[in-house]
Amino acid sequence: MSRWIVVDDTDPEILYSGPWFQDVGSLNGLGNYGSPYQGTSHGIDANGNFSYSFQGTGVIVAGSVLFPTSSKSPVSDPSWACSVDGSKIPTNPNTIAGNRLKLCGTEGLSDGPHNITVEVTSSDQHTFWLDYIRYLPPPGVNSDNAPLRIETSDSQISYGPGWKTYNGQLTQQTGTTLSFVFQGVYDLRQTLTDLSGASLLWLGFYDNSLPSAATTATYSVDGVKPVTFVLDGTAAQVAGAVQYNLPFFQTPELPPGNHTIQVVYQGDAQTAPLSLLFFETNEGSNGSVNTTSSEPKSIPLPSRGSSESIEATSSQLPNPLPSISLTTQAAASNPGLSSNLSKSSSTGATIGGALGGLTLLVSIFVAILYRRLHTKRRKIPQFAVMDPFYLEPSPTRRSHAAEETPNQGRDVVSHSSAPANFKHGRLGAPVARNSQIGRNALGPRGPVGSYTVSIGTSSPPLQVTELYPGEVQVRDEDSGLRSHDGIMIVQDLPPAYVLS
């Protein structure tokens, strides 16, 4: 199964020769066949040409016509001549003004590479407008990465009861359904940093000879909660003519893979029908459809059934065009919520990211601070304390001391069950230390170690206690204000007196 590939006038593979210029928007609203494809056109008001190479069995060139032929002016101005591989192909004279009109085309080409060339002749500054080229690739060629036009006869479209052929397909039966399996793809021709998903566009028509009262229908992609869109044929009644190629809805950009869309008609025989001319897949962000077109001009219109010569690929959009976010069913139930949810999700992600980053920075700061303090503490030199006081235990004193090796991390705990005799002025045993200044409880760690030195021949052995870095205890002989070196932490103990 082959589907037409659409090549916009802005495609760099189209080779222009002559004073061509690009237009955006000025042709919107011309005629009753919609705005130019993607809202853009290439024009020339002098002699020139363009060419395009493709691989396919058919090709069609479409453009906008401002100066149609008539009985008074049977020769087109501007005029054009088309050829494929050097052989001329038929051109289409147009008796109406409008966009997306077929200028020339052919089918039945051999399966292989071809080149189409269009020679333009213009006088009186009448502008020739190119809208797009579409070609039919041979069977088996992968066209998933290109913008496609999908006709109503496509084998992947399943029609429920109630559909009939009428300028395409049309239904006026309540509850009629349609399903279609299609590909959500990425445009691989863009840079890898600018990939974006494809969307599906439904284009239909309103006939002024049919009921026009507003009604609704729904669409759902991959089983997500249906989105409602409005059908209103008033525009056709006001214009007094058929309005072709109206986009009824457009899906959001979809990830790669198969997707299924289901549409359900909710009107009846007294309301505007649901119609389908063709589907169109747009390649990512380049698939946006112009929404600024004005009302159609009052011009002669073709009779019903003449739409075969119409190259309709997009049109005026309802504002806003119904769409659905496939990531949330809340947005699906109300299309107006989609943008709000998107903004909310973006804000939430921003706040979450900021909080996460702040938490990480705080954690790093705390880790660095802890490491610096720990390193600084280890670098402070150890100090020895000479305690000139001696605790002489009574004969009945019992000692319960837990012996620990230096640096093992437990205090030596001594206590007595009998009164002790205190003598003032002697050098003696180490004084138990507190781990925290101002508290009476012993800390979780004990002295680093102890050793004995002699000071002169008249002095008894001096017991020196080596405490943890920066912490010492000093027992003074009397009360009063003491001044200590700011490097170490000193705990002053009250004077000890001899019991009488």
Image: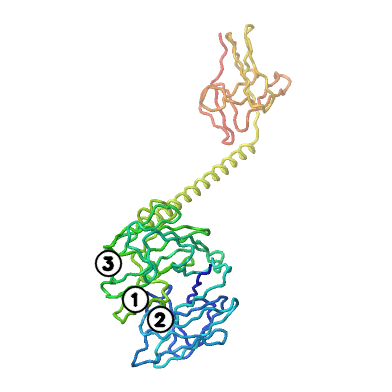
Q: Looking at the picture, which amino acid does disc 2 mark?
A: Ser
Determine which quarter of the picture holds residue 426.
Answer: top right
- The image shows residue 9, relative to residue 415, as above or below, that is below
Numbered disc 2: secondary structure:
strand
Q: Position of residue 475 (x, y in %)?
A: 57, 23
Q: Earlier in the sequence, mark 3 or mark 2?
A: 2
Q: Residue at x 59, y 24 (%)?
A: 433
Mark 3 or 2, closer to the camera: 3
Left/right placement of residue 304 relative to residue 399 reads left
Q: Residue at x 40, y 57 (%)?
A: 324
Q: Looking at the picture, which amino acid does disc 1 mark?
A: Arg
Tell me the tag on residue 271: none
Q: Position of residue 396 (x, y in %)?
A: 63, 6
Numbered disc 1: secondary structure:
loop
Q: Position of residue 388 (x, y in %)?
A: 63, 21
Q: CA distance from mark 3 to mark 2?
A: 30 Å
Tell me the tag on residue 64: 2
Mark 1 or 2, closer to the camera: 1
Crowding near the residue tagged with mark 2, few <14, some 14–19, many ≥20 C-alpha atoms within 10 Å: many
Residue on which disc 3 sits: 211
Q: Earlier in the sequence, mark 1 or mark 2?
A: 2
Q: CA distance from mark 1 to mark 2?
A: 20 Å
Tell me the tag on residue 304: 1
Residue closer to the observer: 258 or 176: 176
Q: Earlier in the sequence, mark 1 or mark 3?
A: 3
State if disc 2 and disc 1 touch (CB < 8 Å). Answer: no
- The image shows residue 9, relative to residue 121, as above or below, that is above
Crowding near the residue tagged with mark 1, few <14, some 14–19, many ≥20 C-alpha atoms within 10 Å: few
- The image shows residue 468, relative to residue 74, as above or below, that is above
